[in-house]
Image: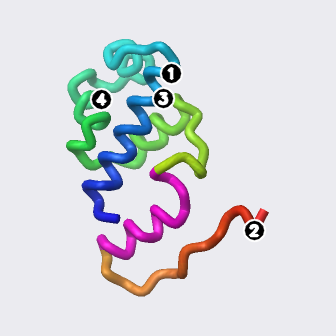
Amino acid sequence: MELQTFLKNFGRTLKETRRQMGLSQVAASEKMQIDYRHYQNIEGGKINLRLDTLIKLINFYKLSPADTPFEVNNCIELMQSVHNQELPKPMNLASSM
């Protein structure tokens, strides 16, 4: 998975979750104290995220590690494509619980 695909998938997850919560982009961005335009770009998958913003979004939307794109295999695949390094093989979380 390429970084752009990861960001688009994450933005899609945010949008779906926000809509399920009955929030507009403006309301969600205000509640998280994120600039509206910045939040709009995050949902659109147009910008890379700072770690503190990523954590704020995960906490606000109560996203779990199993939520796309946070599933561990997606993250490992992303790291492999970005760094083109040998990384641990994808794990099956269901069997490790």
Task: Point out residue 16 in the picture as x, y percentages from the top left corner.
Answer: 44, 30
Range shown magenta: 69-82
Residue occupying the far right of the picture: 97
Q: Is residue 72 magenta?
A: yes
Q: Is residue 48 left or right of residue 29?
A: left
Which element is circle 3 on?
A: helix
Residue under label 1: 20
Image quadrant for the C terminus? bottom right
1 or 4: tag closer to the N-terminus: 1
Q: Which mark is residue 17?
A: 3
Image quadrant for the N terminus? bottom left
3 or 2: tag closer to the N-terminus: 3
Q: Which mark is residue 36?
A: none
4 or 3: tag closer to the N-terminus: 3
Q: Is residue 18 magenta?
A: no
Q: Is residue 87 above or below residue 8?
A: below
> Hey, what amino acid is under mark 4?
Tyr
Q: Residues within 10 Å of mark 1 (few under 14, many from 20)?
A: few
| Main secondary structure along the magenta-highlighted residues | helix
Q: Are marks 3 and 1 in contact (CB under 8 Å)?
A: yes
> For the residues carrying marks 4 and 2, which lies nearer the camera in this image?
2
Residue under label 2: 96
Q: Are marks 3 and 2 in contact (CB under 8 Å)?
A: no
2 or 1: tag closer to the N-terminus: 1
The residue depicted at 47 percent of the width and 13 percent of the height is 22
Q: Residues within 10 Å of mark 4 (few under 14, many from 20)?
A: many
Q: Which mark is residue 39?
A: 4
